[in-house]
Image (cartoon, rainbow, N blue to C red):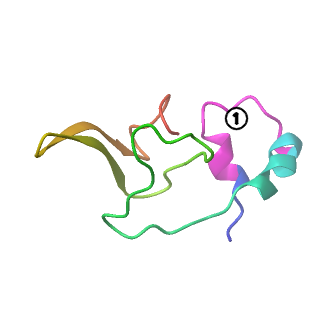
């Protein structure tokens, strides 16, 4: 796994932490490469993970009857204040 501290520093939630503080929480993170079309969670699931999008796009959607309704598209460029 690459050094996650620079990536954490870009996340608004962590931007005010010192490098030392970021280093102390960095072991809590695991880098994962997710294959396209993998479902990460379902509506109503209890949240027990924190996702930081380093590259790629995450589609947040729900199915209304038989139609997919896209609620949001998240990426490393636009997720400030959301997932990143």
Q: Residue at left 60%, top 38%?
A: 11
Residue located beneath label 1 in the image: 14
In the image, 65: left or right of 10?
left
In the image, 21: left or right of 42?
right
In the image, 3: left or right of 45?
right
Q: Residue at left 68%, top 51%?
A: 6
> Which of the two residues, 14 or 48, is positioned nearer the viewer here?
48
> Which of the two residues, 46 or 23, is positioned nearer the viewer here?
46
> Label 1 neighbourhood size at 10 Å, few (<14), some (14-19), many (20+)?
some
Q: Residue at left 44%, top 37%?
A: 44
Residue, far left: 66
Instruction: Pinpoint residue 79: horizontal percent, then vertical percent.
Output: 43, 37
The kind of secondary structure element at disc 1 is loop
Instruction: Pinpoint residue 24: horizontal percent, then vertical percent.
Output: 87, 49
Is 74 contained in the magenta span? no
The mark tally for this picture is 1
Residue, far front: 65
> Quadrant of the image for the N terminus?
bottom right
Instruction: Pinpoint residue 78: horizontal percent, then vertical percent.
Output: 38, 37
> Which of the two residues, 7 or 73, is positioned nearer the viewer here?
73
Tell me which secondary structure the magenta stretch mostly adopts. loop
Q: Quadrant of residue 14?
A: top right
Is 17 contained in the magenta span? yes
81 is higher (above) or lower (below) than 9:
above
> Which of the two residues, 74 or 4, is positioned nearer the viewer here?
74
Q: Residue at left 10%, top 46%?
A: 66
24 is higher (above) or lower (below) than 2:
above
Q: Which residues are magenta?
A: 6-19
């Amino acid at each position: 796994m690459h050094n996650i501290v620079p990536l954490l520093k870009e996340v608004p939630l962590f931007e005010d932490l010192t490098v030392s503080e970021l280093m102390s929480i960095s072991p809590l993170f695991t880098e994962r490469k997710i294959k396209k079309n993998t479902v990460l969670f379902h509506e109503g699931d209890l949240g027990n993970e924190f996702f930081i999008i380093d590259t790629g796009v995450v589609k947040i959607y729900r199915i209304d009857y038989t139609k997919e309704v896209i609620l949001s598209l998240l990426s490393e460029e636009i997720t400030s204040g959301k997932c990143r």
